[in-house]
Amino acid sequence: MSRIVIHVDMDYFYAAIEEREDPSLIGRPVVVCMYSGRGEHGGSVSTSNYTAREYGIKSGMPCSRAIKLNQDAVFLPVRKEFYTEVSDSIMEILRLYADSDESFEQISIDETFIEVTANCNGDFECARKLGEDIKQKILEKEQLTCSVGIGPNKLIAKMASSENKPDGLTVISENESSSFLKDRFPSQLWGVGDVTAARLEKMGIKTVGQIASSDIVSLIDVFGKKKGSWLKKAAQGIDESPVRQREGSEQIGRIATLPENSSDHDLIMPVLDNLADDVIRKAIERGVSFRQVTLIVITSDFKTQTRNHTLQRAVAEKEILRSNLDKLLKDFLEENKSAIRRIGVRVAGLQEVSSQTTLASYF
Ligand code: DCP
Ligand code: CA
Ligand code: CA
């Protein structure tokens, strides 16, 4: 059975959020800048929308240069906190598709690997449907587009997602991997940087296919054992690295089955209260506070839904958790008629509690 990994990358993320918040920006070149505070235009470009990219404006370039490329572009300062909140909500949506909590790997603010091997039983058509569903959910809930890549491992999934950007969906099955790779420049292989690309060029290697058919001994000669064997495998589309939860992206969660299916707030809340107690106890044990509160609901028809809320600051206080869950549950019950079967609590955005004073305020 083939492994199946989904890679999701949001399109022009910071700029897309700014467009969503202010639709009058749509159609104009938008540049999001990380201002350094030195001079009016000191700083570098975080990202730009696709209209601005047509003028050559790119991530990483000085903002002063971007202005020269297009004086009429809209320049906006980075709002990192806000983008992180949006990112958290997107991750909440994506998490539900993973085989398990451990098979979900967020690699940056707008990018994630999701292992769906078990969920799809190795069937790429099933994975394609999940990919379509992911795109639709993110669009519905966040009004943002993303590009999805699906492959037999992280390497292929990652490269597939940039194939049809923006708003793309590209599926590359195990059989298609080598033809997908073979005519590309070595620099396009995920993990090959400028230095490696230049060395390969010197060896007369111009395509990924040529790496794949190179003698491994000569690759190891030039790149050393580790990198040399990695190159040989990667060029053939082989990548065994697991999808795994990153440190700092952990969460604490508890879930329970109700004594009977119910849509009665007064009946459900005591169960939720106990779960919240457990979660707080665990957070205190681990010395962490949290910023994101999620209510998980599994209805009598076995559908899973979540509702989440991001707090102003990280806390680990029972009362705050309880009142947020209470509100999320009320909102849910107002919108939904089907009875609830299982209920759960999850907190994320965990932060180490460093100072004693903050710890004391737990109790
Ligand atoms: N970012 C940044 N500085 C960089 C690169 C990126 O601050 N040098 C931020 C802004 C981006 C976000 O990270 O919106 C995600 O980076 P990506 O490389 O995924 O770029 P985008 O999402 O902006 O565009 P694309 O549609 O090409 O993925
Ligand atoms: Ca992106
Ligand atoms: Ca990215």
Image (spheres, rainbow, N blue to C red):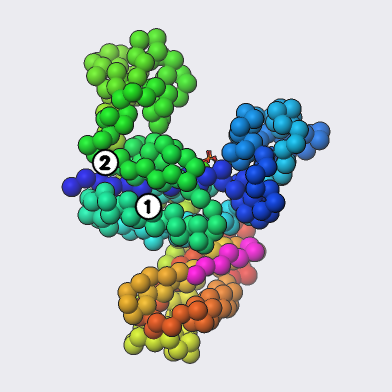
Q: Which residue is at a point 61% across and 34% down the rendered structure image?
A: 53
- The outermost residue toward the left is 1
Question: The disc labelled 2 sits on which kind of residue?
Answer: Ser
Q: Which element carries disc 2, helix, strand or loop? A: loop
Q: Which residue is at a point 63% across and 70% down the rendered structure image?
A: 361
The magenta region covers 307-313
Q: Is residue 304 left or right of residue 210?
A: right
User: Which residue was labeled with disc 2?
Assistant: 173
Residue 152: image quadrant is top left
How packed is label 1: few (under 14 Cα within 10 Å), some, or many (20 or more)? Answer: many
Q: Which element carries disc 1, helix, strand or loop? A: helix
Measured from the top left, where is residue 176 in percent x and y?
26, 35
Viewer-closest of 102 and 111 = 111
Viewer-closest of 325 and 76 = 76
How far apart are the alpha carbons under marks 1 and 2? 14 Å
Residue 7: image quadrant is top left
How packed is label 2: few (under 14 Cα within 10 Å), some, or many (20 or more)? Answer: many
Circle nearer the N terminus (1, 2): 1
Measured from the top left, where is residue 270 in percent x and y?
46, 86
Q: Is residue 158 left or right of residue 312?
A: left
Question: The disc labelled 1 sits on which kind of residue?
Answer: Gly
Residue 228: image quadrant is top left
